[in-house]
Image (spheres, rainbow, N blue to C red):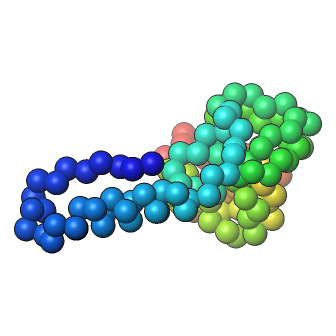
Amino acid sequence: MIVLMQTRGIAHRPPNFVRMLLDLKEVSVQQIPHKRTDARLILQSPQDNCLIAGARLQAGERVEIEGEFVTLAKTIDLGHKVARRALQTDEKVLRYGAIIGHVTSDVQPGEHLHTHNLESDYLPTYTHDAGHAFVDHRDR
């Protein structure tokens, strides 16, 4: 694939400068390995290590992530996150190319990322699990 670029403003460059840029662009595009991912899993930014379910995915279903097939251990609801790759405990989770929190346990590709294994680094995470309670704003 060759990407055309506007040449105005670089006329003062050597005549082969534009051709060199086009050659570099063509080489860099061709060298990017394409790894298939199920179309129902949305990558919001190339830096992300999570994918967003664009549809409800049933437990036991096989999906392709980065060219590898994984079987989903549990149902993933629309809009929920799954790991794009293996994540180690305390590793940061990126969505939209920004850190949204860290995993609290090791996570495998395709595993559901939610409050049971993902903790925000910015906002308290409140659940109905033992030892957690919602904030009561009535006393303030």
Q: How many marks?
A: 0
Q: Is residue 41 visible?
A: yes
Q: Is residue 9 left or right of residue 6?
A: left
Residue at 68%, 33% (x, y): give it. Answer: 40
Percent position of residue 125, x then y: 65, 52
Q: Quadrant of residue 136?
A: top right
Q: Quadrant of residue 58?
A: top right
Q: Is residue 123 visible?
A: no
Which is more toward the observer, 35 or 88? 35
Which is more toward the observer, 138 or 93? 93
Q: Is residue 9 left or right of residue 138?
A: left
Q: Is residue 134 left or right of residue 75?
A: left
Which is more toward the observer, 127 or 107? 107
Q: Which residue sits furthest right?
A: 60
Percent position of residue 59, x then y: 88, 35
Percent position of residue 79, x then y: 64, 34
Residue at 62%, 58% (x, y): give it. Answer: 33
Q: Is residue 80 left or right of residue 18?
A: right
Which is more toward the observer, 129 or 56? 56
Residue at 7%, 68% (x, y): give it. Answer: 12
Percent position of residue 31, x then y: 55, 62
Residue at 19%, 50% (x, y): give it. Answer: 6
Q: Is residue 89 above or below residue 62?
A: below
